[in-house]
Image (spheres, rainbow, N blue to C red):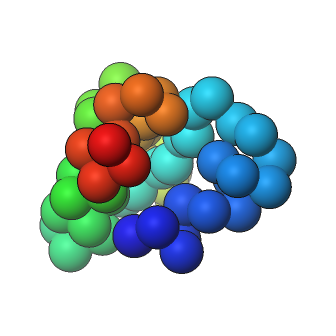
Amino acid sequence: MKQIMAYPLQTLQCKRCTSKSARKNKPNRRFLERLGFVVEGVQRRAYDGKQDIILYGVLLEELKWKK
């Protein structure tokens, strides 16, 4: 997880990261949640005009594995 998040958090000095996932992509959503991302919203029918997209976000201080 540290390697995945190292570029945005260490190199770019980001204070937060955002990700999107199709609602039906449960493996990707579980992966994001294990990284510490939380659901911040839904974009209805934003993926291919048919599927919803779930918006995820995480703040640097919320990363459990970083502490």
Q: Is residue 27 above or below residue 29?
A: below
Say which residue appears at 76% left-offset and 40% top-offset: 13
- The residue depicted at 48 percent of the width and 49 percent of the height is 20
**Frontmost residue, 43 versus 13:** 13
Residue 66 vs 43, above or below: the answer is: below
Please tell me how many numbered marks the rendered image carries: 0
> Which residue occupies the foreground of this view, 67 or 14?
67
Which residue is found at the position 25% from the left and 44% from the top? 64
Q: Is residue 23 visible?
A: no
Q: Quadrant of residue 7?
A: bottom right
- Decide if residue 15 is on the left or right side of residue 1: right
Evaluate whether residue 6 shows in this view.
yes
Q: Nearer the viewer, residue 23 or 65?
A: 65
In percent of width and height, residue 26 lies at 18, 67
Hey, which residue is sitting farthest front in the picture? 67
Estimate the x, y position of residue 24 in percent, counting from the top left. 22, 63
Where residue 28 sits, quadrant-wise, is bottom left
Residue 58 picture location, percent across and down: 42, 35
Q: What residue is at 55 percent from the left and 61 percent from the top? A: 5
